[in-house]
């Protein structure tokens, strides 16, 4: 009987996972592998994709200034957006957490709710605000702060503002999650021992929510680096990022092998950054708590 | 508990204005009576909402998105439940690798998935088909479904199941009469999150959708890249209204923070 249970326990998990495994092998592993192989093929304007293998596409991306600018812009933007999200999202999560209900749940809904609304809609909102006759320029000119409309649409500033708006909820939610684990007694203990509010914040709260800020940063960075809709709508043709470049190679130039190489490089950069970031953070916390 | 100082409250107000401004602007512009983008300064008009109904393109795309999200969320859940039971209930070689594998689509940029599916579907003859589109959505939403179902299975006490087994119930009866009813909240939450993720997906779908399977986000994206008019604003506003209603219901049922923690993680 015991043997039957032991045997019964060993067989089902594989059986239960089979549908998922089959689906993933057919529809995730195979397409990814095909794209990887495709990135080594060459492309001819007249005959299309040629089944030969070389590193030409990768060399083109690595050697061409045009692609350097795009990759630098993408990861530079990701860095700036991540920093701004941390500086805005973490304090906001802390403030929200100190509010009393019903305000707390109401404002939490206002901050997290936009995540459920399509990125296209949220970006459209910024496109409307950024226009020459848009609310931002009307306000600035009305207040006499500027004489002529500030150009925000088709600029990287505009794209960064909109990306912060799209992604800052992830930071708030990540910091929020770590604040829920924070014992309010530690804050009170600090205050009762004579520390100022600021000292308590700096020495008690910040170190405890740091893991939340760091994991939120990772999410925001990865999502900004691969963002498509916002840079495409607000950046236009000239302000290209990696995702929109891959899109153009696939659907406009039809140079799929080059597009595949760009996509593989984006994936590789993302994976390298995520894993090395995790490793550094883990090491840091192992030292602090080990 | 409201101990936030004045500086904190000013910061908070500015933050909330920043979060809501673009959505409010979309909703205001949607009510304009003019033929171009402008604030409804001369009274509110519903003409651009009526215009949506006169555009079969958008209605078709909306129905396609709805249908696609229902089909792909249901497939994703049907696959996630057994996989979650395997991962949460059993210790077996490869368990950690399976879990990482099933959650891996979260790590892959959607543009990379998009180009991969485009190539794959072209090669196997599924390009432009609904089934291809639905399966590609299943891959994207699986991690969300899996995570919520997994959480509900992990927190489950096995006492009732053991009792049923000792009373002679078969495995299938135990699952159907005991386990499944207990994890229904997790399944429902996972389905809703999967549905929303599929309904809103643009970056991957832009590569895979054909004229006959175009989804609402793709249709809207194509429209915006050509022209920004009050029609697209009223359509967006309609989507915002529907989402807000949906959101309030979800918040009442689950708590939005619980549902969204770790989304995109």
Image (spheres, coloured by chain):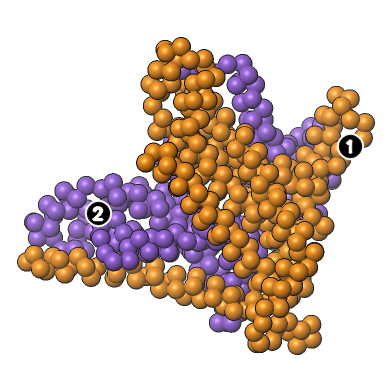
The residue singled out by tag 2 in the image is B179
Disc 2 residue crowd, few under 14, some 14–19, many 20+, Cα 10 Å: some
Q: Secondary structure at mark 2?
A: helix
Viewport quadrant of the C terminus of chain A: top left
Q: Secondary structure at mark 1?
A: loop
Q: Position of residue A250 (x, y in %)?
A: 71, 71
Q: Nearer the viewer, residue A256 or B213?
A: A256
Q: Position of residue A70 (x, y in %)?
A: 75, 59
For the colour orange, the matching chain is A
| Viewer-side label of 1, 2 | 1
Disc 1 residue crowd, few under 14, some 14–19, many 20+, Cα 10 Å: some
Q: Position of residue A281 (x, y in %)?
A: 49, 46
Chain B, chosen colour in render: purple
Q: Is residue A251 left or right of residue A91?
A: right
Q: Nearer the viewer, residue B70 or B108?
A: B108
Q: In which quadrant of the rendered view does residue A53 lie?
A: bottom right
Mark 2 — on which chain does it sit?
B
The residue singled out by tag 1 in the image is A149
Q: CA distance from mark 1 to mark 2?
A: 62 Å
């Amino acid at each position: 009987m015991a043997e039957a249970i032991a045997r019964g326990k060993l067989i089902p998990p594989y059986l239960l996972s089979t549908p998922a495994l089959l689906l993933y092998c057919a529809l995730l592993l195979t397409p990814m592998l095909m794209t990887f192989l495709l990135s080594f093929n060459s492309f001819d304007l007249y005959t299309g994709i040629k089944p030969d293998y070389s590193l030409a596409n990768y060399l083109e991306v690595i050697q061409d200034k045009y692609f350097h600018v795009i990759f630098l812009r993408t990861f530079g933007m990701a860095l700036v957006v991540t920093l701004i999200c941390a500086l805005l999202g973490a304090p906001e999560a802390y403030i929200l957490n100190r509010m009393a209900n019903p305000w707390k749940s109401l404002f939490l809904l206002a901050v997290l709710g936009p995540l459920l609304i399509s990125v296209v809609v949220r970006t459209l909102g910024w496109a409307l605000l950024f226009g020459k006759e848009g609310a931002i320029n009307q306000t600035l000119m009305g207040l006499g702060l500027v004489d002529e409309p500030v150009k925000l649409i088709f600029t990287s500033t505009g794209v960064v503002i909109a990306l912060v708006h799209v992604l800052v909820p992830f930071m708030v939610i990540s910091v929020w999650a770590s604040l829920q684990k924070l014992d309010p007694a530690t804050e009170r203990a600090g205050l009762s021992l004579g520390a100022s509010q600021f000292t308590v914040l700096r020495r008690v709260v910040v170190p405890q929510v740091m893991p939340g800020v760091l994991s939120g940063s990772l999410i925001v960075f990865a999502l900004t680096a691969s963002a498509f809709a916002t840079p495409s709508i607000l950046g236009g043709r000239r302000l290209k990022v990696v995702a929109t470049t891959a899109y153009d190679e696939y659907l406009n130039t039809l140079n799929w092998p080059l597009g595949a190489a760009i996509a593989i490089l984006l994936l590789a950069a993302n994976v390298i950054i995520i894993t090395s970031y995790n490793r550094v953070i883990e090491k840091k916390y192992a030292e602090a708590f080990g | 508990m409201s101990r936030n100082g004045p500086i904190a409250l000013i910061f908070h107000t500015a933050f909330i204005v920043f979060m809501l401004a673009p959505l409010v602007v979309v909703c205001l512009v949607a009510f304009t009576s003019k033929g171009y983008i402008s604030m409804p300064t001369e009274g509110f008009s519903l003409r651009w909402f009526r215009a949506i109904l006169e555009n079969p393109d958008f209605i078709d795309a909306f129905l396609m998105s709805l249908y696609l999200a229902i089909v792909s969320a249901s497939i994703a859940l049907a696959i996630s439940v057994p996989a979650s039971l395997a991962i949460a209930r059993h210790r077996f070689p490869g368990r950690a690798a399976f879990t990482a594998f099933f959650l891996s689509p979260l790590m892959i940029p959607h543009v990379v998935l998009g180009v991969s599916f485009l190539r794959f579907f072209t090669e196997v003859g599924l390009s432009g088909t609904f089934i291809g589109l639905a399966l590609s959505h299943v891959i994207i939403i699986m991690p969300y479904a899996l995570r919520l179902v997994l959480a509900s299975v992990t927190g489950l006490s096995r006492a009732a199941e053991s009792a049923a087994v000792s009373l002679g119930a078969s495995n299938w009866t135990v699952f159907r009469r005991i386990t499944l009813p207990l994890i229904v909240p997790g399944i429902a939450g996972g389905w809703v999150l999967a549905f929303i993720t599929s309904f809103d997906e643009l970056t991957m779908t832009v590569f895979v959708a054909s004229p006959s399977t175009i989804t609402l986000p793709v249709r809207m994206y194509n429209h915006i890249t050509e022209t920004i008019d009050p029609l697209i604003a009223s359509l967006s506003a309609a989507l915002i209204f529907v989402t807000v209603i949906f959101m309030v219901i979800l918040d009442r049922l689950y708590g939005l923070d619980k549902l969204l923690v770790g989304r995109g993680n």
